[in-house]
Amino acid sequence: MEARKRIIIVGAGFAGLRLAQHLENTQYDVLLLDKNNFHQFQPLMYQVATARLEPASISFPLRKVFQHSKNVRIRIAEVLSVDMQNKTLRTNIDTFTYDYLVIAFGATTNYFGNEQIEKFSFPMKSVPEAIQLRNRILQTFEDALIIDHKDLQPLMNFVIVGGGPTGVELAGALAEMKKNVLPKDYPDKDFSKLTIYLLEGTPFTLNPMSDDSRKWSQKYLEDLGVIVKTSTIVSNYDGKTVQLQNGESIDSLNLIWAAGVVGNTLDGMPKESLTRGNRFIVDRHNEVQNVPDVYAIGDISWMTTPKYVNGHPQLAAVANEQADILAKNFKAKLKNKSLTEFEYHDKGSMATVGKRKAVVDLPKFHFHGVFAWLTWMFVHLMLILNLKNKLLIFIQWAFSYFSNDSTLRILLKPGTKKVDNIPVERKL
């Protein structure tokens, strides 16, 4: 009897997790590797950062997802390198052999090579980073009570860089917190000086979306009191002053960086397989160019098609569809059937700015306002992985809607004691 082939999937984001789910109880042995033991729902990470949702609401334990799987196994590991000749993947816990390798470890924050910005700004690409940002925001409000008046304004200036969905949604959430929450939490403090800036390098917020959505997203933000500066590029930040390319500056102790992403890299992969943004060049079956049996899906992949000559957008919808087609092709391989080429079917995009304020682009029409906001909530609830989390988020959203408040503003600071007394042999 022929031995079962092993598929190693690196990364449990949207693409990696969905692929593993599709391959459950097939004739493949599937090994899913991730540095975390949970899947994180990135579109709602800004709500964790602004104390609207608990981290557990948007995080799903991987072992829970695959509790009843006969062929999917989980390992928590940092991937170090790949040996394509011997078909081995080296990690910090062991070296694994594979028949097929699927790279789905996504992208990380792009600081465009500026080490100062990387050192002093706050990213928001993971749950731990969202918790760190939440702590910073809440601590800022506490510090505002005791800081000398002459030093107050830099503390009160929140600068968000990047006018995509993450930046727009975060700016709107902070503005609503200023309006609805802070006067109740701090009746002895005037937070009118709290100023939220949103800086975007292109001429528009939500630049990839329709003209209608661009216009309304900026209007909603400005109605909430956010200072929106488009065609504005940050050149440097030293932890105290945000320097702009046009020569202007903003004094701020809180710079939040949401200006773009860059792909994670993997030692051992040929440099020729990478293109701009550190994305792997793949064919219509998501196989990496000139690298047999190695595939890339999701944000890390770069595929050109007649419809998308400049590659696909780095969206969860693209990642999910690529996982669907790759799973279908892996199953086809078992039956020696022909493979299916990938073609993205754009179902639309959306972003929310605040309560009853959102924009939605569908393939044939666009809308905004209350109905767009309800649509945004419904779609995101449906994308949440399990019923328990759907209910938790719905209840929290309903409470926040009627009370203009939340009960989650808790500073969770990391402990300082480190104990490492478990003897684990790390095979490298």
Image (cartoon, helix red, strand yellow):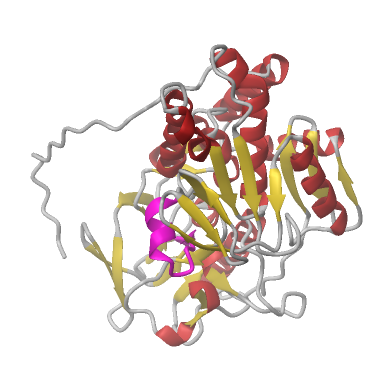
Q: Is residue 34 left or right of residue 191?
A: left
Query: Looking at the image, is 126 positioned above or below residue 278?
Result: above
Q: Percent position (x, y) of residue 132?
A: 41, 38
Note whether residue 163 is visible: yes
Q: Is residue 10 left or right of residue 357?
A: left
Identified at 30% across, 84% down, the residue is 85
Q: Is residue 116 magenta?
A: yes
Relative to 366, does residue 91 appear above or below in the rendering? below
Which image quarter holds the C terminus? Answer: bottom left
- Residue 137 visible within the image: no
Judging depth in this view, the residue of 267 and 103 nearest the camera is 267
Task: State yes or no: residue 280 in magenta.
Answer: no
Q: Position of residue 207 (x, y in %)?
A: 74, 60
Q: Nearer the viewer, residue 322 or 204?
A: 204
Instruction: Looking at the picture, tell me which residue is in the foreground, 21 or 366.
Output: 366
Can you give x and y, in whole percent of width and height, for residue 148 in the image? 42, 28
Tell me the quadrant of the picture where the N terminus can be found.
bottom left
Give percent across and percent down for residue 418.
15, 37
66 in relation to 279, above or below: above
At a point 74% along the width and 62% down the height, the residue shown is 208
Total number of numbered discs in the rendering: 0
Q: Which residues are magenta?
A: 104-121
